[in-house]
Amino acid sequence: MIGIENVGIYVPNYYISNYDKKDKFEIDDNFIKDKIGVEQVTRKSINEDTSDMCVEAFRHLTTKVDINIEDVECLIVCTQNPDNNGIPHTSSIVHSKLKGKESCACFDISLGCSGYVYSLSIIKSFMEANGMNKGLLFTADPYSKIIDEDDKNTSLLFGDAATVTLLTNSKNSWFPRKFLFATNGKGSGALHNNNGVLEMDGRAVFNFSATVVPLQVNNLLKEIDMKLDDIDLILFHQGSKYIIDTLIRRLKLDKEKVPIELNKHGNTVSSSIPLILEQSITKPINRILMSGFGLGLSWGSCVIEKRKKE
Amino acid sequence: MSKIHEEVIDVITEVVGNLEIKEENLDTELKKLGIDSLETFNVLFELEEKFGITFPEEDVEKLNTINSLAKYINEKLNN
């Protein structure tokens, strides 16, 4: 059975402080720290592309785990801001930069904030169906490519980052137990690319998130006969501090179980969950619930468990 | 103050937290009461759920006081 063995991350060094935008957007320190919860947003360099960010995440992974690229049989990139408008697919470019072997399967997945949960299910199923032992799942969605820095709705929130998750047939891993997925295509206009510029209807995205996520989390737990008390950690997509606080309140969650970590980089789209997962999988805990939601409108949740395979 | 006014105030207090609303504040703009844009989204959302109504986007801008919200909800419920 395929599970998560380790995670590598890359957060660019360059950032824009939201405190420098207080006058421009008529906001105060309280709004920055306690409401959106983003003090600064990271930005990739001009010369850096999506594939370069993936390579940096892989470099970080190699500092944590002994991995030979020759052993990688599957390489997937989840992005909607690929190199060269997606032609060729960014996973192929990453494969070239990492000098992957020819018999390695590569493809991209086009999803936003729900992307990590969906992609995790896809790569696990793909690897198991094809008898593969080692695969890499990258997330890299540099929204700075499509952000209007004068748009209060988006420029204060979105930051750039990349992650890579190593999936293996190892005996000691985090194994996905159950996934749930959903889509509301009619609501897709709430967050979309308008001629190269990201536009967001904040109220519609808030209403969507506050409504569907608690329902899906409860349904997921019901399907696997578990309660919130059985979960050690809940990793929500880091859309904004306010939406996570709202989910905590509506689901009556223990705040200690729900990390909010977007203040130093912002909402990094499909990278937001694995950025926290990277620190979480080494903790003395056994069960993590992950829930991604946003653009699409799309949402997906899953539970992963740490266990020793028999 | 009507029952709907009281329910609107209850929702605002639950969403925003430490906020004292007096009868003379019923026509004060929510922004001037210290309720920011994110909290306004949340107040509207909770009221929609509570009363089973929707606030269309084109009407939201004018629903900026407790009185205007209570009046709007009352009309929706009676139509």
Image: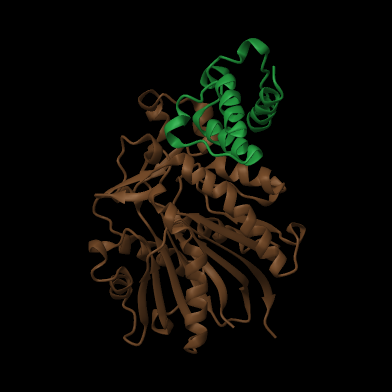
Chain colours: A brown, B green
Q: x, y percentage for residue A168?
A: 53, 79
Choose between B20 and A39: the one closer to the eye. B20
Total marks in image: 0
- The residue depicted at 52 percent of the width and 43 percent of the height is A206
Q: x, y percentage for residue A173?
A: 61, 75
Residue A295 visible from this viewpoint: no
- The residue depicted at 29 percent of the width and 49 percent of the height is A146
A140 to A99, vertically: above or below: above
B16 to A267, vertically: above or below: above
A264 to A117, vertically: above or below: above
Q: Quadrant of the C terminus of chain A?
A: bottom right
Choose between A36 and A16: the one closer to the eye. A36
Left or right of residue B74, residue A204 in this image? left
Q: x, y percentage for residue A49?
A: 28, 58
Q: Which image quadrant for residue A287?
A: bottom right
- The residue depicted at 35 percent of the width and 78 percent of the height is A106
- The residue depicted at 45 percent of the width and 40 percent of the height is A202
Residue A196 visible from this viewpoint: yes
Q: Residue furthest bottom?
A: A131
Q: Residue furthest front?
A: B79
B6 to A129, vertically: above or below: above
Q: Quadrant of the N terminus of chain A?
A: bottom right
Choose between A100 and A179: the one closer to the eye. A179
Q: Which image quadrant for residue A285?
A: bottom right
Q: Which image quadrant for residue A277?
A: bottom right
Q: x, y percentage for residue A112?
A: 42, 58
